[in-house]
Image (cartoon, rainbow, N blue to C red):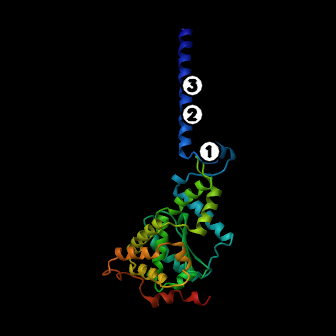
Amino acid sequence: MFQQYFSFSNRFYRRLALGSITFIITVGIGLGNVQPSYAISWLELMIRGVQIVQISNISNAQEEEIGKGINQELISSGQVKLYRNSSINSYINEIGQQLAKTSQRPNIPYTFQVVDDNNINAFATMGGYVYVNKGLIATADNEAELASVIGHEIGHIAARHAIQKMRDRAISQGLLSAAGVDRNNAIQIGVELAVSRPNSRADELQADHLGLEDITKANYAPAGMLGFMQKLLSKGGSPPTFLSTHPATSDRLKILQQDINPQTANVGNGLDNQAYKNRIRSLYVN
């Protein structure tokens, strides 16, 4: 009986050992196939005890946490100077939250902030953070035009463009392992992307499409989107910052003109120029 037990045990342990070796080889191959050029192994990252973010499968909570870190770094480093005007900030937040509810991704918290900068610009980062320059607010003629820009930036968030860019940048910098990327590195990459804003033509067209859907659902007149785009193109000379970070504006305008029915372009809210000037009056006295 002991001999039978011994024979059974040998067979059992041999199978277990072969199974373990097969598992180790399979996992090794799998990890190697994820990204063979990654500089740091998952084991090394675990030993270092750093917080790792798997960008490809990032959760809403992780995205919000990284977005918060990016926002804090942008402000503390002085790369973004917030405009401390409660009336204007309240107005931008009012428009933004209304658009967030009708967006394609309403299930995350959104933060809308005004940047103390006279350049015509707006941008978005991960986790629902949208930044609008006071120069852009002053340039818009009405609320529908302003809403079109905010809707466009929400479109970037809805399409997770910043997450895709972060993954590409992490790979190019050799910072992405099979396990993911260090949270601190993710935040630093996010700050770099927020400053450079390297949006592709495809990203811009998609954000335009999503933004147009958003403002229409929120009952803003689609003409606002056309009006602001035409305003930017008519500037002439050195293009404003908004144009330099949002390429192919003329092509985008043509596509929007095709997507918007002229008969319904002015149907909706936000086209009252005087009402808009009244709402942003404090912008000119501070």
Proximity of marks 2 and 1: CB atoms separated by less than 8 Å:
no
Mark 3 and mark 2 lie on one chain; the one further toward the N terminus is: 3
Of residues 29 and 284, which is closer to you in this image?
Answer: 29
Instruction: Specify the amino acid type for callout 2.
Output: Ile
Look at the numbered disc 1 and give the secondary structure of its residue.
Answer: helix
Name which residue lies at 56% across and 9% down: 3
Q: Are marks 3 and 2 in contact (CB under 8 Å)?
A: no
Q: Quadrant of the N terminus?
A: top right
Residue 215 image offset from top left, x and y in percent: 41, 74
Label 1, residues with CA under 10 Å away: few <14, some 14-19, many ≥20: some
* Numbered circle sitting on residue 17: 3
As shown in the figure, which amino acid type bears the numbered disc 1? Trp
- For mark 1, what is the residue? 42
* Label drawn at residue 24: 2
The image shows residue 80 at horizontal and vertical percentages of 63, 73
Q: Residues within 10 Å of mark 2 (few under 14, many from 20)?
A: few
